[in-house]
Each structure stands twice: as C-alpha cells, then as structure tokens.
Image (tube, rainbow, N blue to C red):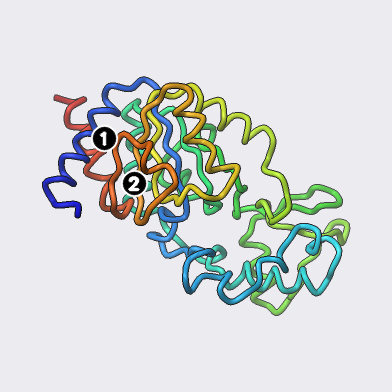
C-alpha cells in the first residue's frame, strides 16, 4: 500500500528527475480528461458499455447513413461537445512548459484542454485528433464544433457541409482509421529523444499510442507513470505513482518551480 510518506517521496523523485532532465515528454490519456468531467468511453458506465464499438468504424461511417446518424448521436451524448474546462493536471503540465522544463505533450485525448490550459499548440501532439473541428470529407471545409452542435440541438441528426452537401466528420480518429502520419512520427521521434517520459492517466493499452513509453525506454529515458490502476509498463517504470493526475501533478510542478526560483 502507498503511504503518504511514500507518495511524497515519489512526488519529490519525479520533481528531481524533471529538474535533471533536458527533454521531458508528458504523455496523457483519458484519466486526465475524466477529471474535467469528460466520460471515459472504455470504463464501466462509459459509452462503449451502452453502444457496440464495432458499429463505429470509419468504414460504416462512410458507407451507412444510419451508422452516421448513430455516431453523431453518440458523439453528442459523449460529453465532448459540452463545455468543459482544464483541470489542475492540465495547468500543472502547462506550467512545466512556462518553466522551460517541457519538450512536448503527446496526448490520446481529443478535447483541446492542454492548449486551453496554456500549452503551445505546436508542442501538443494529438494522436487521435481534436474534437474542436469538423471537416467535410468532400471539399475539405472546416467547421468549429460549436456550429455543428447548434445544428444538432435544433434537431438535425446528420449534419452536411453547407458548401457542397458532403459528409461531415469530426476531426478525430475513428476505429479502423490510421493515426495522422506526421503527428505520429513526430511523437515517436520526441519519445525516442527524451530523457524523461511521464505517462499520466493512461492505461497504456491502446496502440499504437501505447508504444510511446517503449520508444522512450529504448532511447535510454527514464519512465514515470502516474495512473489509477495497473499498466503493462509498471514493472519497467523508474517511478510509479498510484493517484489522480489533478492531485499528483500540481505538487510536482510546485516543487520544480520552487527549486528553479530558489
């Protein structure tokens, strides 16, 4: 069992590693977003306990109007269209950047909250896309999600492009769809070249995103894991903290800030 003294020692240890490191990569998963009130699709009570994920492939989205209708319903009900705010973990990660101790953020999340908390967009690599945009698959016109949400609220069940009547799709990665090539490659390179990789709020089982800590370890980096629940990389982690991102990251960043400013 992790005692409070153990926890504080581990928090200190992560802060020490950040201070010693030149290239710190932070990797975030659903456990960071859930603390802002966004449901975890895969957890008990999540979307996939009420809907079959096999119905939500890119192939079905493109080929079936009824599938598109169902997918827009799920996206509308999933909480990603609602008003959510960054939580203390997001702000703590952004503070690391302002302190000059963050190379980049690699995230599985699609909520844009790292940018809203203050991370530079060019330092955030979104492996699964960004829910803030909807794109026409025919002409490429982009819409802010808020525009499409207004249509859904008015009873439109399948929105179409106003310019060409083409199929609209949230700018996120669907099942069966490859991750964005340039973003994935950049994430891999940053992972390989870092000297400290901090995984926060991820079960590290969804691939290929979950390969990132392996790339970091192979490159000689140290690995810190902050998560509720086990991950396949726990035995390889140099520091493993059981806990919520929003409770663990702020004191880590505070320790880093205090020592940098001492």
Question: Who's the residue at 41% across and 55% down the image?
Answer: 31
Foreground of the two, 161 or 231: 231
Q: Secondary structure at mark 2?
A: strand
Q: Does 103 sit left or right of 176 as displayed?
A: left
The residue wearing badge 2 is 226
| Distance Cα–Cα, label 1 vs label 2 | 10 Å
Q: Secondary structure at mark 1?
A: helix
How far across and how far down the image is residue 90, in percent?
A: 38, 47
> Tag count in the figure?
2
Q: Which mark is residue 14?
A: 1
Foreground of the two, 55 or 67: 55
Pointer 1 and pointer 2: residues touching (CB < 8 Å)? yes
**Relative vertical location of residue 212 with respect to residue 247 in this rendering, above or below:** above
Task: Bin the neighbour count of mark 2 within 10 Å (Cα to Cα): few under 14, some 14-19, many 20 and up.
Answer: many
Q: Is residue 161 visible?
A: no
How far across and how far down the image is residue 41, in percent?
A: 54, 64
How far across and how far down the image is residue 117, in percent?
A: 41, 46
Placement of the N terminus among the 4 image quadrants: bottom left
Q: Which mark is residue 195?
A: none
Q: Does 129 sit left or right of 249 as displayed?
A: right
Spot the residue most to the bottom. Answer: 155
Q: Is residue 70 visible?
A: yes
| First along the sequence among labels 1 and 2 | 1
Q: Does 211 sit left or right of 97 as displayed?
A: right
How far across and how far down the image is residue 199, in percent?
A: 41, 41
Question: Who's the residue at 56% across and 52% down the image?
Answer: 110
């Amino acid at each position: 069992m992790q005692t409070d003294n153990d926890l504080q020692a581990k928090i200190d240890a992560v802060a020490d590693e950040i201070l010693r490191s030149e290239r710190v990569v932070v990797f975030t998963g659903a456990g960071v977003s859930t603390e802002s009130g966004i449901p975890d699709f895969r957890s008990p009570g999540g979307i996939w306990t009420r809907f079959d994920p096999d119905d939500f492939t890119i192939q079905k989205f493109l080929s079936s109007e009824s599938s598109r209708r169902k997918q827009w319903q799920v996206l509308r009900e999933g909480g990603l269209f609602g008003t959510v705010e960054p939580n203390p973990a997001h702000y703590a990660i952004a503070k690391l950047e302002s302190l000059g101790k963050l190379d980049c953020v690699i995230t599985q999340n699609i909520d844009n909250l790292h940018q809203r908390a203050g991370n530079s967009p060019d330092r955030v690599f979104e492996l699964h896309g960004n829910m803030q945009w909807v794109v026409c698959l025919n002409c490429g016109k982009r819409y802010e999600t808020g525009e499409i949400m207004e249509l859904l609220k008015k009873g439109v069940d399948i929105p179409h492009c106003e310019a060409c009547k083409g199929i609209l799709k949230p700018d996120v990665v669907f099942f069966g769809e490859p991750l964005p090539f340039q973003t994935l490659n950049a994430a891999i390179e940053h992972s390989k070249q870092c000297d400290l990789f901090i995984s926060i709020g991820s079960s590290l089982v969804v691939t290929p995103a979950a390969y990132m800590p392996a790339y970091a370890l192979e490159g000689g980096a140290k690995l810190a894991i902050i998560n509720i629940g086990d991950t396949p990389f726990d035995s390889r982690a140099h520091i493993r903290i059981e806990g919520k991102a929003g409770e663990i990251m702020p004191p880590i960043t505070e320790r880093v800030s205090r020592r940098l400013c001492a």
